[in-house]
Amino acid sequence: MKLPAPHPNELIYSTVARAGVYFGLVSPKQLLDEVFADRKVIATLDLPSHLQSIVGLLSGTGLYDLETLVYKHTLFPLYAPFVPEHIRQKAIKRMSDRADGAVHLMLGVATSRIKSVRTFRFCPICMERQLHTYGEYYWQRDWFLPELPVCPEHGCLIDTSIHLDEHRHQFVPLNPACFTTKTSNKYVANDLPLALAAAELLEQPAQQSPTFAQWTHFYHEIATESGCGRGKQVDHEKILNLVCSRFDIRYLENKGLLKQSQSNSFWLRSIFRKHRKSFSFFEHLIVWQALVPALSVSEIFIKVRRYAPETVLKKSQSSVDNAISISDECRMYRQKWEALVLQHGVKPARHQATGGSLYAWLYRHDRDWLLTFNEQQKRPLKTVNNRVDWHLRDRQLVRHLIRIHLLSENHPVHQRMSATWLLNQLPHKNSVAKKLHKLPLTHQFLVRYAESVTEYQLRRISQFIVESREKHMEIRRWSLFRNVGLSEQRITPDTMKILDSLTYL
Ligand SMILES: [Zn+2]
């Protein structure tokens, strides 16, 4: 078994789908078993979770850690710079394991007007290049920019009739033969520059998120610089006019960006006030293109990060402010949520009839309070949850080890696959090493399959001999030693015996 390495800009979703094709696994459940050892994993295009399994399966390449996968092969970089740093970090952590929708909530995707793309689509020109360069097709992440149905490079994108929700546990590979109904996707000229900027966002390296204070400063300054300042204030009317003259009104209306434009809480006003919540990447891009069109995305981040990260409020002060400033509406939501949680507990409360929407509202408007409150409610339960089902874990770990072992057959590991090396590939590796006495199957596996030094040397040697034969190269002992990284000193007596028995060496 072999998990193919992701192609540039390929969604992890797509890599898993290709793996299914490689292994010839027809049943989606079987693919879930092989890759995640968990049949409940939901196939997610934009912000997938359970990435630790993928990191494990790609560990032989030495190229993919969690952060690399998240930043190069998901849509995470579209959202990351706009949420506070602690949320960014929490989201990455959740993406490594089970997320249960938390990542979409944290990043505002679940509650924002800007929705994830739910149907498959592709760019035929990109596909031609894929076939030419890699000999196969794959889902590219820049085809799935929310609100922007356009390939940033070529413009056109073709919609398929295949809806992601119809395949919750299935990873559908990109195979044009399978898409019967295709409709040409209409995009508006305005989408293209925004998609280009979004593609630039995707290219940003993993880095700390700017703080709300930095965003506040940045927006205040660009308002002043574009002549929309009024003393220390911002002239919101002028800004609206500027945005409307850059993008045509109908375009903005279609994207839902002019809703409640007269209201005091209109997003285009709020973004120029003190930031208290995150704005979507789309809202940021709209303002950037209208007010600072000459700046690239990278230049904007450099500018934003130059401001002081924090206008520090003393903790007691901010909580007093908070107590005074919470609205009646907020108080009502808090009380309802408290009642629901006290009755059912945090997680079940979210699944009650009104629980989901209460949670979402509080998450958007009163996040700090909500997270603190929920955390407090969880604490007493923790001791109960700590009980590990060792038998279950043992079986999961062994399955994981078998996968690593199978993977190594097609994807040779360069180090010796010692017991320590194998343990290091596992989730919860530290506790596993300490609790081996509770994990008989895992223990057995390590005893049986961990490579001895001789086995390792012989594996490298036979690999070299096979490769040389394939290339019709003559095998000399010195070239074998050099290529395999062995020396007369390091070679074990057993390996030496076998080498000596090979007459052609
Ligand atoms: Zn394209």
Image: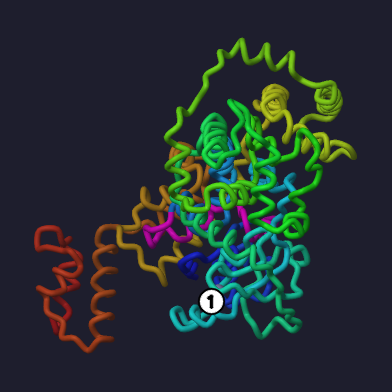
Residue type highlighted by circle 1:
Cys
Q: Can residue 407 be seen in this snapshot?
A: yes
- In the image shown, does 101 or 269 lie closer to the viewer? 269
Give coordinates of residue 71: x percent, y percent.
49, 53
* Image position, residue 332 (x, y; %): 86, 24
Q: Dot 1: what SS?
A: helix
**Which image quadrant for residue 174?**
bottom right
Residue at x 55%, y 42% (from the top left corner) = 226
Magenta part of the chain: 39-64
Is residue 406 placed above or below 24 in the rendered structure?
A: above
Q: Nearer the viewer, residue 441 or 222?
A: 222
Q: Is residue 337 left or right of residue 24?
A: right
Query: Measuring 67% from the left and 76% from the top, which residue is drawn there?
Result: 158
- The answer to whether residue 399 is visible is no
Q: What kind of secondary structure does the magenta stretch mostly adopt?
A: loop
What residue appears at the point 84 percent right and 25 percent down from the top-left corner?
329
Q: Which quarter shows the C terminus?
A: bottom left
Residue extending farthest bottom: 472
**Label 1 lies in ligand 1 vicinity (Cβ under 8 Å):** yes
Residue sitting nearer the eye, 51 or 419: 51
Disc 1 target residue: 126
Q: Is residue 261 above or below residue 247?
A: above
